[in-house]
């Protein structure tokens, strides 16, 4: 299909409408096993209730698509602009995030109705030929941004829910794990060498969707390095725990050591000791820690301390991206939604499990690439204003929707955070 093909606009509209419906339905599917009470839980200021995610992703389309492309359409409810705005100061004030769990109304059914109405209006907008107009390409790009945004929230639905369920002594099962089998213990990590030289980093303007923070594409110089062929396993991390890793200040960054003491960390989030064994809470319920599984739910501080203990370091994001380019973006992504980590097995022959198991902490600050400029207006607040004091993570996790990440994708969190499926891949200097 080319742009000169007379059938192209109709096919483009159809493809976008189908994709819109599929992504929106996938969010509802995540909420399917949950009760209205489950959907209200907020266990900490960084997490949000599932119901808030359902409403906020809808607010995004209403605010950044319908309000701009159908200005005559009245909002579904004027109060939603305040209630479900996350952080866009250009739109207006926001209800405080730490208190989102207090908004018992609108109820779940009203939020579902909100979704249905916005979906109908947005699909009607596409049907009415808005994609063919002067701003058609811009509209298509904005809808795609909304869908990518919704996929990011799909992951947050799972991680926020896990954090809340983990507080419940009944260890609720969200979805039973499917086809999970413990494999043999993985072989030695092994490292893949890379020569020093110039590398191109970042996404190009052409090709599929990318967030603004993935560009502009630019050159970097890399020193010779080697990258672990697979992520760190729970068994390897357990050796660090049992070697008093959490009691040895020499292994920790100063801020990390403060976090260990103030927060009482002695293992990854969701791990608990039962006699001589370690157990972990998962969305499939409580189970023994599987030594063959990639370790998850560690902070940057823990990843850094583990790397120091192991005689290695965390990779720079440019090293990670350079090494990952050309690798197929396949892995253990969330299908259809849940937690599906897969055990590591055997001896890795090349780089493995780059995508879709755990987000891998890098040693790089989340900073703008050279010549980066956020978009004009409130939508420019999406990524750029967070480029301070956070670290970049790469690769996607077992809670990331399939098809959402790529080699240039930059996730970012503060170094103390560990409620995401964040793990570790080691690197070392060469020469
Ligand atoms: Fe958002």
Image: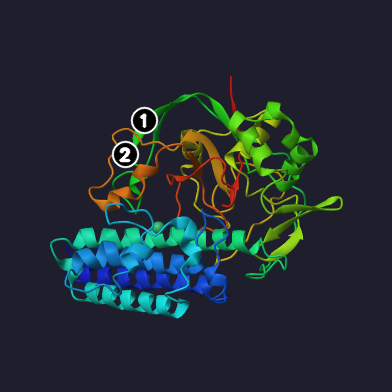
Q: Disc 1 on helix, strand or loop?
A: strand
Dot 1 corresponds to which residue? 219
**Is residue 426 at least partly visible in the picture?**
no
Vertically, is 370 above or below 377?
above
Residue drawn at x 42%, y 57% is: 96
> What is the x, y in percent for residue 60?
33, 63
> Where is the N terminus found, in terms of image quarters?
bottom left
Crowd tier of the residue under label 2, counting other residues whose Cα lies within 10 Å: few below 14, some 14–19, many 20 or above: some
Crowd tier of the residue under label 1, counting other residues whose Cα lies within 10 Å: few below 14, some 14–19, many 20 or above: few
How many marks can you see?
2
Residue drawn at x 68%, y 29% is: 251
Which mark, residue 216? 2
Vertically, is 279 above or below 12?
above
Q: Disc 2 on helix, strand or loop?
A: loop
Depth check, front residue: 128 or 75: 75
> What is the x, y in percent for residue 187?
74, 43
Task: Report how far apart the C-alphas of labels 2 and 1 lie in the structure.
Answer: 10 Å
Depth check, front residue: 349 or 251: 251
Residue drawn at x 37%, y 65% is: 83
The residue lying furthest to the top in this view is 431
Which mark, residue 237? none
């Amino acid at each position: 299909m080319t742009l000169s093909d007379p059938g192209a606009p109709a096919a483009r509209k159809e493809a976008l409408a189908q994709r819109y419906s599929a992504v929106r339905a996938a969010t509802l599917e995540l909420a399917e096993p949950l009760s209205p009470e489950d959907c209200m839980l907020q266990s900490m200021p960084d997490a949000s209730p599932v119901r808030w995610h359902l409403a906020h992703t809808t607010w995004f389309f209403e605010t950044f698509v319908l309000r701009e492309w159908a200005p005559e359409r009245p909002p579904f409810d004027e109060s939603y602009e305040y209630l479900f705005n996350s952080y866009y100061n250009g739109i207006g004030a926001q209800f405080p995030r730490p208190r989102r769990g207090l908004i018992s109304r609108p109820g779940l059914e009203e939020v579902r109705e909100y979704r249905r109405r916005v979906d109908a209006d947005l699909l009607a907008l596409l049907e009415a030929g808005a994609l063919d107009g002067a701003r058609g390409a811009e509209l298509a790009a904005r809808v795609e941004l909304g869908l990518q945004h919704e996929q990011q929230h799909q992951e947050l639905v799972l991680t926020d829910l896990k954090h809340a369920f983990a507080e419940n002594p009944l260890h609720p099962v969200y979805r039973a794990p499917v086809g999970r089998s413990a494999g043999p213990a993985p072989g030695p990590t092994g490292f893949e060498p890379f020569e020093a030289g110039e590398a191109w980093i970042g996404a190009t303007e052409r090709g599929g969707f990318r967030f603004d923070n993935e560009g502009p594409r630019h050159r970097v110089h890399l020193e010779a390095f080697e990258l672990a062929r697979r992520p760190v396993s729970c068994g390897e991390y357990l050796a660090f725990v049992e070697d008093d890793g959490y009691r040895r200040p020499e292994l920790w960054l100063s801020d990390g050591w403060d976090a260990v003491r103030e927060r009482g960390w002695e293992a990854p989030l969701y791990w608990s000791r039962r006699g001589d064994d370690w157990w972990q809470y998962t969305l499939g319920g409580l189970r023994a820690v599987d030594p063959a599984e990639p370790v998850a739910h560690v902070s940057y501080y823990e990843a850094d301390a583990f790397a120091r203990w192991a005689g290695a370091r965390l990779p720079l994001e440019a090293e990670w991206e350079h090494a990952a380019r050309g690798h197929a973006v396949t892995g253990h992504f969330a299908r259809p939604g849940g937690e599906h980590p897969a055990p590591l097995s055997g001896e890795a022959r090349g780089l493995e499990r780059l995508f879709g198991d755990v987000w891998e902490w890098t040693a790089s600050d989340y900073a703008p690439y050279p010549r980066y400029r956020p978009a004009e207006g409130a939508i420019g607040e999406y990524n750029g204003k967070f480029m301070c004091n956070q670290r970049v993570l790469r690769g996607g996790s077992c809670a990331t929707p399939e098809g959402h990440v790529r080699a240039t994708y930059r996730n970012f969190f503060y170094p103390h955070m560990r409620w995401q499926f964040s793990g570790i891949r080691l690197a070392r200097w060469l020469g």
